[in-house]
Image: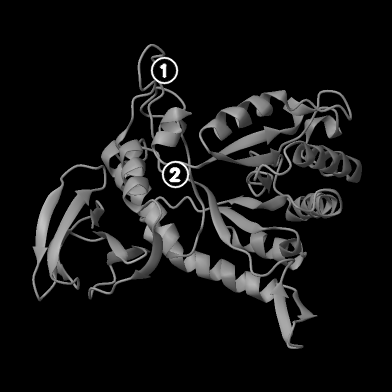
Amino acid sequence: MKMIADAGFDWVRMDFKWDATESERGRYDFSAYDRLMAAMEQHKIRALFILDYGNPLYDNGAPPRTQSAREAFARWAVAAAKHFAGRDVLWEIYNEPNHEMFWPPRPNVDEYVSLALTVGRAFRAEAPQEKLIGPATSEIDLPFLEACFKAGLLDYWSAVSVHPYLRSDPERVASRYCRIRELMTKYTRVRTRSGSDGAAVHQGGADGPIPIISSEWGYSTSWPGMSKEKQGQLVARQWLTNVGNDIPLSIWYEWRDGGADANEPEHNFGVVSNSYPQDRNPVYNPKPAYLAAKTLTTIFGGYRFEKRIDVGDPDDYVLAFRQGNDLRFAAWTTGRAHSVHLPLNPGQYTTVGHTGENVAHLTADPKGLAITLSTAPVYIR
């Protein structure tokens, strides 16, 4: 947990499993999650808990597709929300319900919508201060998302969560986010209330327009064309791309490599390796992705994204971040490495590589700051 906090991660997303917390009908045991929350809160890390999967006590463990199972799932979900009330938990309704692995034998959006509506209504009635999000789709499944929005789920959610999982450049996600927002606008139920001056105030959903969050997305180093070094670049580029597209929360999949097989994709998504030498500090071997995450959160902690600067090539990305009067920049390209002049004021600048190395001190002249862009982000301050 200390390594997680030291890298600047301030959220952890974790399955909150129904069958692990209700082994007798109507009796709930959240003690394992109490211990997890205590460890997280010690390091000021917040929880995104996924309300997920079936329970052998209901429908033989199948996804909740009957009304009795949906109501039992909702009672359990509300009990969990009440148990952890006031501790800033985000509750995500299910994990990848559009994937047959998680909604066997095959996904059914109508079944998912019925479950999500049942849980949403229960939260609104019994835990109205707790935040519910969804649907956590595998990739950006626009037909599935549209069905959710059309059914009215935007009225119950505080955010729309998706798992983009591009195997290509993360920057290509921008158009997909735009399409989601178009659908959200189409199906937002506009409500009108009277403002203090008598003018109409329009609200989308329950509390206004809601954000999109990237609640799971990673790159496995066993994928073709991938390496540990490239994965480190993509952690930074993914997060920067999300920030530049007004995505307020990005969850990287995953924390620790799932195993030791270099050829198994599921064993190689982590930012730290799988081995656990308990007698050593740090207890995990950090990968370049860990160093990239730590460098990014260190350089830009407390800064807010301001704008993307046009340097003449759509493949070049220069993002400006501000804290008060201080500006810092992240710069990279999706194309071949080349030199550019960034339109910065004359003066002295320090550049830092995306893993915290390759520190250099440069001087900007009246033409700007001359710098070489590559697929590895560089940070300028």
Whole-percent x, y for residue 204 in the image: 70, 72
The C terminus - image quarter: bottom left
Q: Quadrant of residue 28?
A: top right
Q: Which residue is mark 1?
A: 276
Residue at 41 percent of width and 41 percent of height: 8
- Say above or below: 29 vs 52: above
Query: Looking at the picture, how far across and down is residue 184, in whole percent?
Result: 64, 69
Q: Is residue 332 left or right of residue 261?
A: left
Residue 282, percent across and down? 36, 23
Residue occupying the point 76% across, 34% down: 54
- Amino acid type, callout 2: Gly
Q: Residues within 10 Å of mark 2 (few under 14, many from 20)?
A: many
Label 1 amino acid? Tyr
Answer with left or right where residue 192 lies relative to residue 3.
Answer: right
247 horizontally vs 6: left or right = right
In terms of image quadrants, where is residue 373? Answer: bottom left
Task: Check disc 2 and report the residue beneath it.
Answer: 218
Q: CA distance from mark 2 to mark 1?
A: 22 Å
